[in-house]
Amino acid sequence: MRDPLCDESYLLKTIESNRKFISKRKEKIIGLKADIENGIQRYPRDNQSIIYITFSQMFMYGMNMLLAKYSLGNHPDTMIDDYLDNITYLENCGEEEAGYINLLWMVGLGILLEMDKEVLKRLARVIERQRIEDALMDFLLKACDIGWNHSTTKYEKKNPYEKTVEIIKIALHDKDKEAASKRLEKYMEKEWFKGHYDFGWRNAHKEPGYYGFWSFDTAALAKILGLDDSALKDNNHYPYDLAHYKNGMTFDLSWYSEPREEEVREETVVYGIPGNPLLERIIPGRFHSFVNEIINDYKTLPDEEFWKKYNLKEIWFDVEEYKEDNKDKNLLGTIIVFMLVDKDYILQLDYKEELIDYIENIHNYWPKEEVKLISFELDNDQQYYAYVPKDAEAGSLYEVKVTEVEKIEEV
């Protein structure tokens, strides 16, 4: 067992059951393809769309098997066929989303298992089709010398992955591998797992369905940079033996130059919320145009059109439910909060979650001002937090009450 927090019998059952699930879905796809050839449509959704979804399900089952096998302690050789099968499933899932973390793990595993370049190129084409914009993924793929030319300073998940740029810079720009190795250790010991608390990872080992969490991407980064990762040998999330499974892959880093932050052009931002100027001190300027549009649309668009434009089905399952809740036209502040959660300005937590565990995930969009933490009180079981200037006095966001949060000390 590599992960002592896992249940051995559960992992064995997971591997076997997921293998059966995949087998059944392969049979389903054969039937669907036959229906297409014969012009038969058995379901409300078209056959090809169902095939895409089925391949996507097979990929998820395949990922579960890879994680379970590694956590169980299987030799890396036993993971190769499953990995190759997963590439095939990804290639056939159309526009169905595979998920950033899963794709990052696939890139990391491909490097650690030392897949040949043609396999990695197949994976790269999937990532390109899924329109992933991520600097860490770019670095890993470029280093493999497979012709990956995408380059961005963006991160699909800034916390924790943005911190990897420090490891890379120290190793390649400063040319200090000892310091880079220490930064790698800090990243894995203090930042990587905590950076996924918002994914519910913190207590996942206490719940059914836990296969272990492994930072294959971090081990791949250490392998590419040639860092000393011996301090992480006993880390419960660092795949140390997989990082040293093979040593025949070469990497190209000749293209590397220290990344520069993208500048935000001030002229593209329209500041001010004329309909409610007090909000300018609790909503950062970069979101003013967006919020103005929401306010105007809320006042002028029919409920059906507004519900559809802002994809409110994630909150109100159907438009009739939304219309009933909005009959008094008293949801504008609530909707703005939801939209700013999607923009990563406001942090949303479940009522069971502790703010101290997620405080690092709250972005500060007021870098030149002293800030304080506020909460937005909505009529549900969720918590909503953001930073605002310390002198901000707005006590409400329309019908949503805004309160200052007492200082929280890190533990």
Image (cartoon, grey):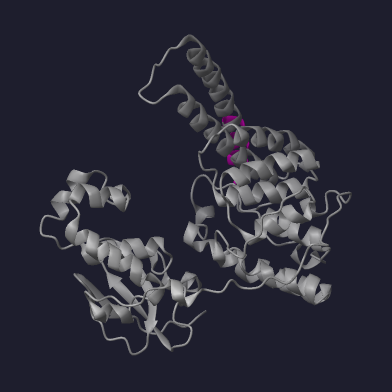
Q: Nearer the viewer, residue 229 or 311?
A: 311
Q: Position of residue 284 (x, y in %)?
A: 38, 76
- Residue lying farthest top? 38
Total number of numbered labels? 0
Q: Can the viewer see residue 20?
A: yes
Q: Image check: 372 left or right of 295? A: right
Task: Name the residue located 86 percent from the left edge and 53 percent from the top edge.
Answer: 250
Residue 290 among those drawn in magenta: no
Write down the region rendered in magenta. Answer: 7-17
Residue 326 placement: quadrant: bottom left
The structure residue drawn at horizontal position 49% and vertical position 70%, both measured from the top left corner, is 361
For residue 192, above or below residue 44: below
Q: Residue at x 48, y 9 (%)?
A: 38
Return the residue nearer the eye: 390 or 129: 129
Q: Is residue 240 left or right of residue 22?
A: right
Which residue is found at the position 56% from the left and 74% from the top? 263
| Side (left or right) of 150 relative to 368 | right
Dominant SS of magenta comes to helix
